[in-house]
Amino acid sequence: MFVSIVGLGLAGLALALLSGCQTYSSSQTLPSGRYLEHPPQYIPPSAPFPLPRELAAQEAAPACKGCAASVPIPSGRTEKPRQQKSVLVKGGDLEDFAVKADGMTFNNFCLAEVPADRHGELPLLKVKGCYRNRTSQQVAFSLVVVGLDEAEEPLWACSIPGNTPGKDVGCLQEVAMSVPPGALKRTASLRFRANVVPSDDPAIRAGSPSTSTSVAPAPTSARR
């Protein structure tokens, strides 16, 4: 019995010495004496994008000739999609500034910061302006105004949508939003983006008063 146990122990020791293993001694895990003879292992780095075929198809898509013609156009509309216009203007040049986009002109902008009526409330920043539809077509528009600081980081933002018949002139709906105190003073420049599309609203007829509706402004945050 003792001989068989000793034989099994010696066989296991011989197998470990031949194959190489780890040893545990004095609370340490140490490699065997033959670890330098092990063949090196190399694992190639994975690709930055795990789907190379899909990536190749996406990169080739913008270079495809005639891709724009393959985009379906909604029924009942023959107009090409209108492109948005983004313009940056300094705060001191706002008086003589105008945004022109697809036959629409937005100008005469006026900004004012009104102090809060009650203690603990934030002041209101009011944005006013005018528009002119130089075309004979009724359109719907959306004007986005973003106030930027010296580092061109956004301080506040608002959106003014509306509808107007052809050859119409009017005032934009006044927009008021809560801003941190002194936001207007820290506004060094403004970015305007206008989007104009044909409107099929039957309520808008030539000669009828234009409408402009204000929406809730984007959340504002004070820079610290």
Image: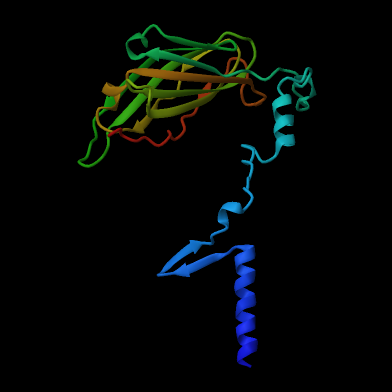
Rendered residue at 64%/18% (across/down): 82
Q: Foreground: 70 or 185?
A: 70
Count the labels in the image.
0
Q: Foreground: 204 or 86?
A: 86
Choose top left, top right, bottom left or bottom right for residue 141. Answer: top right
Q: Where residue 177 sits: x, y (%)?
A: 36, 32
Judge whether residue 22 can be spotted in this image: yes
Drawn side of residue 53 relative to residue 193, left or right = right
Quadrant of the drawing holding the N terminus: bottom right
Drawn side of residue 153 relative to residue 41, left or right = left
Q: Where residue 188 sits: x, y (%)?
A: 32, 18
Rendered residue at 44%/23% (across/down): 145
Q: Where residue 69 sits: x, y (%)?
A: 78, 20
The answer to whether 3 is drawn above or below residue 126 in the figure is below
Rendered residue at 64%/10% (across/down): 136
Rendered residue at 64%/38% (across/down): 47
Quadrant of the drawing holding the C terminus: top left
Choose top left, top right, bottom left or bottom right for residue 121. Answer: top left
Q: Foreground: 162 or 183?
A: 183
Q: Where residue 62 sits: x, y (%)?
A: 71, 22
Judge whether residue 209 can be spotted in this image: no
